[in-house]
Image (spheres, rainbow, N blue to C red):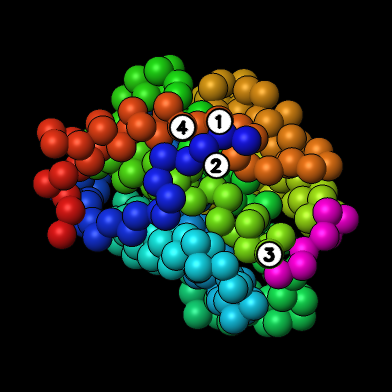
Amino acid sequence: MASTVFSYPKARRIRFRFEHHDSNDKYFVDGDMVFSHFVAGLSGGFPPGEESFIRSVRRVAEQVTDPDLKKRVSGFVGQEAMHGQEHRRLNHKLLEMGYPIEWIDTEKAKDRARRIENRLSPLAHLAATAAAEHYTAVLAQRVLSSDEIQAIPASPEFWNLLNWHALEELEHKSVAFDVFRAVGGTESTRIGVMAVLYALTIPFTYGSLAVSLARDPVARRQPVRIAREAYQLFTGPIFRGLMGDLAKYMRPGFHPDDIDTTALLERWQRELFGADGALVDHLK
């Protein structure tokens, strides 16, 4: 198992400058409608998702006795709370730009999510969080390790947010997993919950993206362009081989730190938050 760079995830107080982006510049990822809608949908889902992750860990927090793990949980909660805050600020900008993501983060939607959580056992809820953290870790590793992805033209502040979020997802990628194990989570529950999420991945991704594009009047008028851009997205560096990487989680005995991201973390901690880091001036 690879060693981690930080013993405890570091919760950074940070603020991004989304207000500087021209709201009329709608397709902010290389002028690509499909890619831009995909990223907007991801951002729309992050705030309620992060809040659910925090609730899942807090449901079992009293059962965590290891002091090291307690400190890691504290860092995890701090990072996830900040992710939700900054993505919610970005989402306000995306709504101004015309992205139909408001339904994801309404009080009604959040109440529905909490009712579903309450029907789950604490271990099942935590297993879902650990599985979702594998999704974000896989995507984060792709974003930070791929020169092809980093070279995609996009609004600089959106890239700053994405790289910061990806870095911190890797910093805390094993916390929910280790809490799940520490409070008695079994391999059968871990793998079973992931199998359900895995089966839903493609239909949910395709379906939600199709709905978002269908609500965009400009996109509706350009079906050939949409088909071309969708093909490029789903055969490109974000999705190429993704399902195989996600499936590694279902291997018996798997641990997130089996995937060594130590060097990648060291590089991006320097690039973003070192002495001359790109985001030092964003810290509060």
Q: Are marks 3 and 2 in contact (CB under 8 Å)?
A: no
The one nearer the camera, 144 or 267, is: 267
* N-terminal-most mark, 2 or 4: 2
From the image, tell me which residue sits under label 4: 262
The three-letter amino acid code for the residue at tag 4 is Thr
> For the residues marked 2 and 4, what is the alpha-carbon distance in whole angstroms?
13 Å
Q: Is residue 118 left or right of residue 45?
A: right
Q: Are marks 4 and 1 in contact (CB under 8 Å)?
A: yes
Q: Is residue 247 left or right of residue 108?
A: right
Instruction: Give the answer, above or below, for where 112 lies relative to 136.
Output: below
* N-terminal-most mark, 3 or 2: 2
Provide residue 75's location: percent of width, then percent of height: 41, 62
Would residue 119 be visible to someone looking at this image?
Answer: yes
The three-letter amino acid code for the residue at tag 3 is Ala
The three-letter amino acid code for the residue at tag 2 is Ala
Q: Are marks 4 and 3 in contact (CB under 8 Å)?
A: no
Provide residue 68's location: percent of width, then percent of height: 49, 62
Q: Is label 3 in a helix, a strand or a loop?
A: helix
Residue at the spot x=42%, y=27% of the render?
A: 263
Would residue 209 be visible to someone looking at this image?
Answer: no
From the image, tell me which residue sits under label 2: 137
